[in-house]
Image: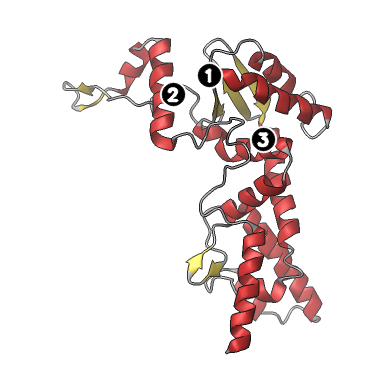
Amino acid sequence: MSRMYFHSRSETTAVHGSERTYGHCLCSNISLALLNINIWYNDIIKLLDKDHYINQTLHNNMSFREPYILKQEVVRQLETAIKVGYEEKILVLNDKPINTWNLLLNTALLVGSDTIKLLVRLHSQCEIHAFIRGKNREWFADIIKKGRSEEVLREKAGWEETVKMLRSNNKETVVTSYSVCSLFPNDEIADWEVPYDKEYDEPDWDKWYDLSEKKRWHLGLRGIIKKYGTSTEFCPETWNDIKFGDEMTVFDLHKKLIEKRRENELV
């Protein structure tokens, strides 16, 4: 089973990877419910990319005797595509593809509780090393504790152990990773110059393991900041402000669809 890890220099805890999948499902279901393709069907279908496979269902509709059955099938396919098609061009607005992955994340972040925000942020950023500074460990532990008391975060998944670890000190930074990706610290995220092996005429990546643990942590943390700035930091100051990409939510999309309706009425 996969794991989401919470690393400090002193200790590592693991939360079941199923909690990440659960977070993805919550994020998608909340955002798709608000997108409400059934209600906005005629507007959203006009945004469908001309090369997307759902067009085959729309145009080869002889197997659907009733229009409402065709509509429900298209809605089902479109919801599935948005849930899983992270890199897929699905919807296009004003000749620009809509990043539906960011759309789901931003919407769930906007309307979600702290616990939902926690699951959304971990789902989207655990494998690129989200981090919590020592001074914010207690704050983050409180969010997890509340999520457990609300039964949103599930029991026997590793949350209790993570709360205990977070509260064990307020000095060390905690960094996340995902078990099917590189753990932290690693030579990929680290801000270091890989030594060159002249004998074999190639970079000597094994030199990473000659560095002390303290040095690897220092270079790893420096690399996160260099690559992502503070966008992967979990802290109270920005907790309610983080958005992804163009920051579009389904509410922004609805507004744009209404504007397009009005434009078409003037033609």
The picture quadrant where one finds residue 224 is top left
What's the amino acid at mark 1?
Thr
SS type, badge 2:
helix
SS type, badge 1:
loop
What residue is disc 1 on?
A: 173
Work out whether residue 244 or residue 68 is closer to the camera in this orientation and state it. Answer: 244
Q: Can residue 157 be seen in this view?
A: no
User: Which quadrant of the figure contains the N terminus?
Assistant: top right
Residue furthest to the right: 150
Residue furthest to the bottom: 267
What's the amino acid at mark 3?
Leu
* Residue at 72% over, 71% down: 40
What residue is disc 3 on?
A: 118
* Residue at 67% over, 48% down: 110
Work out whether residue 148 or residue 65 is closer to the camera in this orientation and state it. Answer: 148
Q: Are marks 2 and 3 in contact (CB under 8 Å)?
A: no
Q: Is residue 37 above or below residue 158?
A: below
What residue is disc 2 on?
A: 221
Q: In this view, does 130 lie to the left or right of 163?
A: left
Mark 2 and mark 3: span between their CA atoms?
21 Å
Where does the image place residue 197, in percent across and percent down from the top left? 21, 22
